[in-house]
Structure formats: C-alpha cells, structure tokens
Amino acid sequence: MAINSSMLLLPIVLILAISTTTQAYDPDILTDFITPNASAVDASFFTYTGLSGFYNPNPKNFTVIKASMAEFPALNGQSVSYAVLQFPPAGVNPPHTHPRAAELLVVMLGTLEVGFVDTTNVLYNQTLQVGDMFVFPKGLVHFQYNRNHNQSAIAISAFGSANAGLLSVPKSVFTTGIDDNVLAMSFKTDVPTVQKIELGLGK
C-alpha cells in the first residue's frame, strides 16, 4: 500500500495540536470569578480568616497554614495562593517540589537558610534575614531550614497557582511502595538502612 505525504503529516499535526493546548499552569477563566452558587455570593465569600492567630512563639514542629483553593474556594481560577510557614528552632521544611507553581517566600521572623536545585543539579542557596525574599522556580526541588537552635522563624509564601501541589521528596521516595531493593541500589546503601528510613517516615 502506498503512503502519501498527507498520511505522514497527520500524526505530526495531531502531536503539535496537543502540545500547544496542554497547560501546566492554571487555565484562564472566562468570568470574573468562580463560585459554587452565584446567587448566594457576598463579600464574605472573598474573605478568608484562616491565617489569623497563626503565631506560636514556641512551635514544637514545623507547621504550614495554607490558604489555597481547598481552604479558600474564592481562589478558584485566580492563580494565587498563600502559606504561612512556622519553624521551631532547628526546624526544617524537607526537600519538596510544587509542580504547578513558583513560590515567592519572604521571611517575617528569624532567619532561614533556603535553596533549590536546578535541572543540571546545581544548588542555589542563601541565608535570608527578616524582610528578605527568595523565589523557588516552578517544579524544582527546594527546602527551608532554620539553622538557629534558639529562635523560631516565620515566613510567608505566595504561589502562582490556586493549587500549587506538593511532592515531598523523602515521603514520595520512601513511603509510596517503591521496592526496597530499588531504593537500596539507587542510594548506594542496603535494605536495612532503607527500612530504617521508611520506619522514621512512618511507612
């Protein structure tokens, strides 16, 4: 059977069409805002009080208070969200990624060591003081660490998505059922060490 040039071009055209319509960010909306029931909306729908009273001078663990689409439905379609990050002394937000948004962090109290790794495995890290800002590019592995063993730290993060997503690297790797032998070979260690890590992460 002879193959004409139009038969060869069709798959290429389809691939190009799909690739240009695929989006890895929040889609634009065609209305001012999205509500579950437009007839019942007033100013309270656009108000969120869940971040009030977040300050704890003596936090025991690293905590995050989020204002994303899940907590604040008025953010649906608006491509923004916030989080308040509170670090106890020597507290860490372990390496993680946000697949759908960049993160812009500002330190409000204390100091933080922050950093991210790019796709060529280069580490960019910095120690931030109160008022300093740092941007974590979308999808890249990053962390925050309160190196001070005597004082807590607080930061606020803004995201370019109503639902930035979160993939914790330790939990994604060690608590999702990847075979222990695969992990041991990948990290150049043994299965008992992998199992200790899994136990510590609550697998």
Image: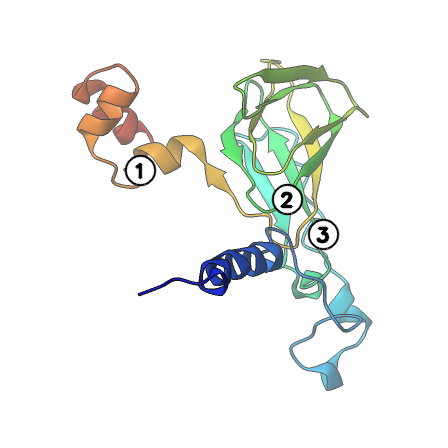
Q: Amino acid at mark 2?
A: Ala
Determine which residue is flagged by label 1: 175
The dot on residue 101 is 2
Tell me if label 1 and label 2 are in contact, CB under 8 Å.
no
Q: How far apart, in angstroms, are the residues tagged by discs 1 and 2?
A: 24 Å
Nearer to us: label 2 or label 3? 2
What SS does tag 2 mark? loop
Nearer to us: label 1 or label 2? 2
Q: Give the mark count.
A: 3
Determine which residue is flagged by label 3: 80
Q: How far apart, in angstroms, are the residues tagged by discs 2 and 3?
A: 9 Å
In the rendered image, the quadrant that contains the C terminus is top left
**Label whose residue precedes the other's in the sequence (2 or 3):** 3
Q: Residue at x 51, y 59 (%)?
A: 9
Q: Viewed as shown, does residue 112 lie left or right of 179? A: right
Q: Residue at x 67, y 54 (%)?
A: 50
**Label whose residue precedes the other's in the sequence (1 or 2):** 2
Mark 3 neighbour class, 10 Å CA radius: few under 14, some 14 to 19, many 20 or more: some
Vertical relation: 202 (above or below) 188: below
**Label whose residue precedes the other's in the sequence (3 or 1):** 3
Vertical relation: 7 (above or below) 191: below
In the rendered image, the quadrant that contains the N terminus is bottom left
Q: Viewed as shown, does residue 63 lie left or right of 46? A: left
What SS does tag 1 mark? loop
What SS does tag 3 mark? loop
Q: How far apart, in angstroms, are the residues tagged by discs 3 and 1?
A: 30 Å
